[in-house]
């Protein structure tokens, strides 16, 4: 009977190895899934994970999908480290696109070099404002931010639907529920493809986040709040201030991602704009170990599953939902293999018991303290 | 004459509210059991949607309502088992595990439901007591429902009774309030939590099946549309008490149905804006009950969401 033995210290090796273990398990489980769907497993896996990397177009598309994922995940990661659960990135992304897009439509057909920066600013403000609602309700009224931010996703999607059916609908169009095409577009980084500057901005955001988390007092405060809220209080770090900060930063990032998507690959406001990046961003954040460098890699990997999934859909008639199953499995296997960071698996019975009252420090995630943030005892 | 029309409208709204509320009643009561044992499973939405497609595919294959419900219960429990293995045995973060379960469930159900769009389920059996169903007002309100409505009420009563009056209920609550003390007394903490999580999954599966078998009755991708999350909010609203969860769910059912009947009532509001109503109401309710933070904390199971480490 295998048993678990707590490690005296979390394993550095396992901390970096577990995402790779999770990827291997997901590939294996994916192969089984394809076999069940009566598709040749190896061929399908190669089609999804290798084929897109063999062409310029595929690589360019990779950056198109990875840009919003990385940007959203970078914002979310700071919050997750602090035990602040913003699950509303999808809504903040939508409202960011709506705010920036409305600005462009309001001044239509006037355009200029200043328009795109202004739209980006409006996108950031829109996303941050949408994220301010759960921040306010948690810090002022103690309402659970997970549920509030999640509910606001649905509200945002209906808001977008209502506006493109009404005031923002293209007056010269055929009565379709969509806005007119924007008079400006995101600059491309590879001519002839759809790769846009959003990817560069996402990489810069990752760099800034890395510097802040590693070298700035703010990053330290966020980590302490997540791992030891009692210590954070004792040290005088203001919890409401950090909650606000985490929400505004992640909301702003998601809003900017939404605006990039609307002005870049899409070019207008359409009801289908929120395509689940806000939720996949959560997986990216965890898969990347909440670390900026890891998030960039995880974002590229998740983008690969999107593009490969589309390719497989066309050439093997693989259902599009298979991508979502894939992404869910990624997170499962990652969470499961996380155990190896803090525990050793012993296959024979071992005489030495774990020390009494042992609680395990956790490098990856705040565990015991943050599960129900608004109902923490002893505050 | 006008009097009768008004009565009809009111009865219709109340009946509609009960139908809209029943999936929430089932899912919230199940989650309540899990949370009383200290398990915070945020995967309710995922378990519901898998229950919905499991029930629907079973009824299309067999034509039997009973088998469809069984399939939904098994599917919901299987999803809950995944969560339990992750969060209880492998000690993964409960919030992240629940989110993973929801995403996985939404994907899995979409994959499973590929060939089922456009089909419709056969009519679900209703209670038929000779003569009683034809009574004015009472007939429709009390005797006219499908069997799952009565089952959901019976389950709320059973959970309320079991938690408050039975030894098993006491153990469940003890595990949720203080797992170390319960463990010291010799109760199998992890086993009790497994059981409570599975009950939660089974009931979420039933709630999902109600959507695809009775309420619509069709399979539509992502048809749960956030009801699993609303059920989670209802548990907080109910202060972890089954009868209050029932009342809360019926209140929400009422809001949903008022939105559908608003056209009949002569309100001219954009349908998309009206559709926001249940979600906004959930936020309003959460704020209202959370304002008194101290009381909320006293009601919440003290070990909710905390992992358990056996110490001896």
Image (cartoon, rainbow, N blue to C red):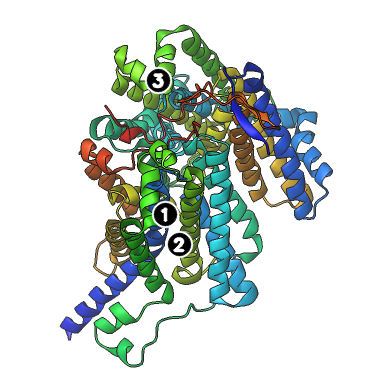
Q: Do the residues labelled 2 and 3 touch (CB within 8 Å)?
A: no
Q: Are marks 3 and 1 in contact (CB under 8 Å)?
A: no
What secondary structure is found at the residue carrying circle 1? helix
What secondary structure is found at the residue carrying circle 3? loop
**Placement of A205 over or under B13, stated as above or below:** above
Q: Mark 3 lies on which chain?
A: A
Q: Is residue A118 in view from this perspective?
A: yes
Q: Which of marks 3 and 1 is in front?
A: 3
Crowd class of label 3 (few under 14; some 14 to 19; many from 20; radius 10 Å): some
Q: Name the residue under label 1.
A: B227
Closest to the observer: B179 or B141?
B179
Crowd class of label 2 (few under 14; some 14 to 19; many from 20; radius 10 Å): many
Q: How far apart are marks 1 and 2 (CA)?
A: 9 Å
Q: Is residue A322 left or right of residue A52?
A: left
Dot 1 or dot 2, earlier in sequence: 2
Residue at mark 1 shares a chain with residue at mark 2: yes
Q: Which chain carries label 1?
A: B
Q: Mark 3 points at which residue?
A: A228
Q: Residue at x 27, y 60 (%)?
A: B247
Q: Distance between the residues labelled 3 and 1?
A: 33 Å
Residue A247, how many percent across, how many down? 38, 27
Residue A213, how many percent across, how many down? 48, 13
Q: Which of marks 1 and 2 is in front?
A: 2
Residue A56, how many percent across, how many down? 76, 27
Q: Are marks 1 and 2 in contact (CB under 8 Å)?
A: yes
Q: Is residue A63 in view from this perspective?
A: no
Residue B53, how many percent across, how many down? 57, 62
Q: How far apart are marks 2 and 3 (CA)?
A: 38 Å
Closest to the observer: B269 or A83?
A83
What secondary structure is found at the residue carrying circle 2? helix
**Placement of A223 over or under B59, stated as above or below:** above
């Amino acid at each position: 009977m295998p048993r678990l033995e707590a490690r005296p210290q979390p394993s550095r090796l396992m901390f970096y190895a577990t995402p790779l273990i999770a990827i291997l398990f997901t590939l294996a489980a994916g192969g089984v899934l394809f076999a069940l769907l009566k598709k040749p497993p190896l061929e399908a896996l190669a089609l999804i994970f290798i084929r897109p990397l063999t062409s310029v177009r595929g690589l360019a598309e990779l950056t198109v999908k990875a840009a919003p994922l990385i940007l959203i995940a970078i914002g979310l990661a700071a919050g997750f480290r602090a035990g602040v659960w913003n699950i509303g990135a999808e809504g903040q992304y939508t409202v960011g696109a709506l705010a920036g897009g409305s600005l462009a439509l309001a001044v239509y057909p006037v355009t200029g070099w200043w328009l795109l920066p202004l739209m980006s600013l409006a996108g950031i403000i829109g996303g941050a404002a949408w994220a301010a609602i759960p921040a306010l309700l948690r810090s002022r009224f103690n309402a659970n931010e997970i549920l509030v931010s999640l509910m606001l996703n649905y509200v945002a999607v209906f808001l977008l639907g209502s506006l493109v059916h009404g005031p923002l609908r293209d007056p010269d169009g055929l009565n379709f529920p969509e806005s007119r095409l924007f008079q400006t577009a995101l600059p491309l980084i590879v001519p002839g493809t759809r790769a846009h500057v959003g990817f560069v901005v996402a990489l810069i955001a990752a760099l800034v986040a890395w510097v802040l988390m590693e070298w700035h007092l703010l990053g330290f405060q966020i980590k302490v709040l997540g791992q030891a809220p009692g210590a954070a209080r004792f040290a005088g770090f203001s919890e409401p201030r950090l909650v606000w900060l985490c929400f505004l930063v992640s909301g702003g990032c998601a809003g900017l991602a939404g605006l990039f998507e609307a002005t870049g690959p899409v070019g207008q406001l359409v009801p289908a704009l929120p395509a689940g990046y806000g939720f996949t961003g959560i997986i990216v954040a965890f898969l990347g170990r909440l670390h900026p460098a890891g998030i960039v890699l995880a974002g590229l990997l998740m983008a690969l599953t999107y593009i490969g999934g589309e390719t497989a859909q066309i050439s093997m008639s693989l259902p599009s939902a298979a991508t979502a199953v894939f992404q869910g499995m990624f997170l499962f296997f990652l969470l499961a293999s996380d155990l190896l960071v803090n525990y050793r698996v012993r296959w024979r019975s071992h005489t030495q018991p774990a020390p009494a009252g042992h609680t395990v420090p956790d490098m990856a995630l705040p565990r015991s303290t943050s599960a129900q943030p608004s109902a923490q005892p002893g505050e | 004459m006008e009097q009768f029309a008004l009565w009809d409208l009111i009865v219709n709204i109340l009946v509609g509210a009960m139908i809209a509320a029943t999936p929430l009643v089932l899912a919230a009561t199940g989650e309540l059991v899990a949370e009383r044992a200290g398990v915070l499973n945020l995967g309710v939405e995922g378990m519901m949607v898998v229950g919905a497609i499991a029930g629907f595919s079973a009824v299309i294959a067999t034509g039997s309502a009973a088998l469809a419900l069984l399939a939904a219960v098994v599917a919901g429990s299987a999803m809950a088992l995944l969560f339990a293995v992750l969060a209880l045995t492998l000690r993964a973060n409960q919030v992240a595990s629940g989110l993973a379960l929801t995403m996985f469930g939404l994907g899995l159900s979409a994959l499973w439901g590929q060939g089922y769009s456009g089909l419709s389920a056969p009519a679900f059996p209703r209670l038929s007591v000779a003569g009683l169903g034809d009574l004015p007002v009472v007939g429709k309100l009390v005797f006219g429902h499908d069997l799952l409505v009565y089952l959901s009420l019976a389950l709320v009563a059973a959970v309320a009774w079991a938690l408050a009056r039975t030894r098993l209920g006491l153990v469940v609550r003890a595990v949720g309030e203080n797992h170390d003390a319960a463990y010291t007394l010799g109760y199998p903490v992890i086993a009790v939590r497994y059981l409570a999580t599975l009950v939660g999954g089974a009931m979420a599966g039933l709630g999902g099946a109600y959507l695809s078998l009775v309420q619509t009755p069709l399979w539509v991708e992502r048809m749960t549309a956030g009801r699993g999350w609303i059920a989670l909010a209802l548990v907080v609203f109910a202060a972890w008490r089954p009868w209050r969860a029932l009342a809360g769910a019926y209140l929400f059912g009422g809001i949903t149905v008022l939105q559908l009947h608003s056209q009949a009532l002569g309100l001219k509001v954009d349908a998309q804006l009206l559709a926001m109503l249940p979600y906004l109401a959930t936020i309003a309710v959460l704020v209202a009950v959370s304002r008194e933070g101290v009381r909320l904390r006293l009601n919440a199971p003290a070990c909710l969401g905390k992992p358990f480490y056996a110490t001896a």
